[in-house]
Image: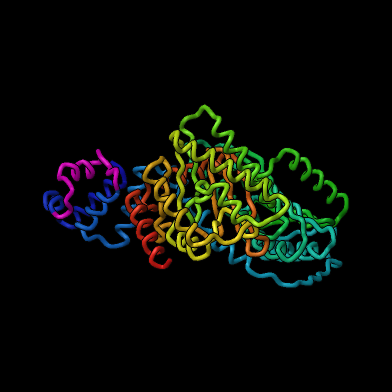
Amino acid sequence: MSNFSQTLKNFVSNQEITIQTLSKISGVDRSFIQHILAGKRIPADITVLEKIMKALMLTPSQEQKLRHLYNVDRLGEDNYNRHLSVKDMIENIDSIKDSNSFNVNVNYNHDFSNFQSVNVLSGISEINYMLKAIIEVESTKKDGYVKLLIQPEHSFLLELLLSIGKNSSLHMEHIFCLNKEVSVNSDNYQNLKYVKNVMPLLLSEADYNVFIYYDDLDVKFNNTSLFPYFIITSDKVIAISPNLNYALFYMTADVHQLYKKLYNDMYHLSIPLVEKVYDPLDYLNKYHQLEFKNQESKNSNLATYSFLAQPCFMYFTNREQLNKYMYDFPQKDEVVSLMAKRSESYYQLLLKGHMFTSYFNEEGLDSFWSTGRISEVPDSFYDPITKDDCMKLLEVLYKNILETPYQAIAVDPDKLKISPYLSITAFNESMIFFMYIHPVKGPFHLVIQEKSIAYSVHSFLEYLKDSQLAYSRESTLDLLKRKIQQYKLEF
């Protein structure tokens, strides 16, 4: 018997209610309830569980516990934990924006003249103080740099790099290890946690670059490793123990040279975690090439997912509309051509049955209507779309949901937050596109090809459409119909 069945059985027993009475109050078949309590069946639709919980008059904490156990039982614990990790990483984007919202002028001055060539540091506070001092001084140098070989679990260090990096031209390189023992059935918690931890730096103004290699994390970093982590500046080194409680601080040229060689050796064995794409045209070229490659694939099960506050409108635009709103700039014809080809080829794929799912929320719809802006396209490219053309796009969107395999699914804002500054596109299980609208730098893209992260994000987006986090097809259509009627009255 599963934990879900046993827990529900205990709640029924504590309420001193008969199965027949529970069936009558909930409207759920008596034999089906008996099979659930015996661990022989699990409801395919959570609304069945909701009816039973309502009939039992459970407390909010009891209901939350049952929903959690239900999801674990239905999806498997590893799959469920992986989905939770991806959800947590996505929802963290809003707090990242807040951390990027201000800059300050700084002038650091620390005196190292009293330190010896080799210094023993003990305790997290002492180590953090030294890290802060050497990185602050390094940030004032014209060609200052920080090279890190350390797992992204040191929250003070990451926050320090974020704070200093966005207020200086300090060049930062970070190498860390991802777990190689990640399979399709794994929860992938550790790798996802590491990527979540470095995401604020990746999406900031800092000159921060991440490189990864693979190993068995449980074996590589343990208490028998003396000082596996180290941080190098242009003239200093700190080597740190696995538990972050002990460190050696070096100020000698020969030791500095040795650690630079160790770092460079590991650098050549590592690969970039992400590819940053700042030029929108470069992104469009890469995006179009990948879509074309997917279209030519013999894998008929390929499906595309997008996750952003607005529904994905760009597939329903045409060349005439693009020419109408695009500014005149040197590469306009090339941009319009790429976008138009993408829309035309995509629509043909829809007619052939290609699956495309676009997640959005009501706030994103309102933003599109009020601003005339499509979040997938940089504002610097085009004039705001008129209300008349906004309405046409909404009606085309609604029609395609009814008549083609295209799925636009509204997300429940109380259960899953979608940042208006983030969009995610997943073509397959091996490559994910993140677009982030930075408050200072504007939009740029991160391309993630790391297999465990790409698979986890794709798997979450696939799971989302049938989860409790999203509305049903019927509820989504009702929402769209209601909003279109509302906008027509405003119009």
Residue at (73%, 56%) from the top-left corner? 207
Q: In which quadrant is the C terminus drawn?
A: bottom left
Q: Residue 354: x, y in percent?
A: 46, 36
Quadrant of the rendered image containing residue 341: top right
Q: Is residue 89 left or right of residue 250?
A: left
Residue at (77%, 59%) from the top-left corner? 170
Task: State yes or no: residue 261 in magenta.
Answer: no
Name the residue furthest right: 253
**Figure check: 481 above or below 346:** below
From where the camera sits, is residue 229 visible? no
Q: Residue 420: x, y in percent?
A: 53, 60
Name the residue furthest top: 298
Quadrant of the rendered image containing residue 115: bottom right
Pick the front one: 212 or 286: 286
Identify the coloring: rainbow
Q: Is residue 318 left or right of residue 139?
A: left
From where the camera sits, is residue 23 visible? yes
**Figure check: 222 above or below 65:** above
Q: Residue 293: x, y in percent?
A: 59, 33
Residue at (59%, 56%) from the top-left corner? 325
- Range covered by the magenta-colored residues: 25-45
Residue at (46%, 48%) from the top-left corner? 358
Q: Residue 447: x, y in percent?
A: 62, 45
Pick the front one: 153 or 365: 365
Pick the front one: 97 or 3: 97
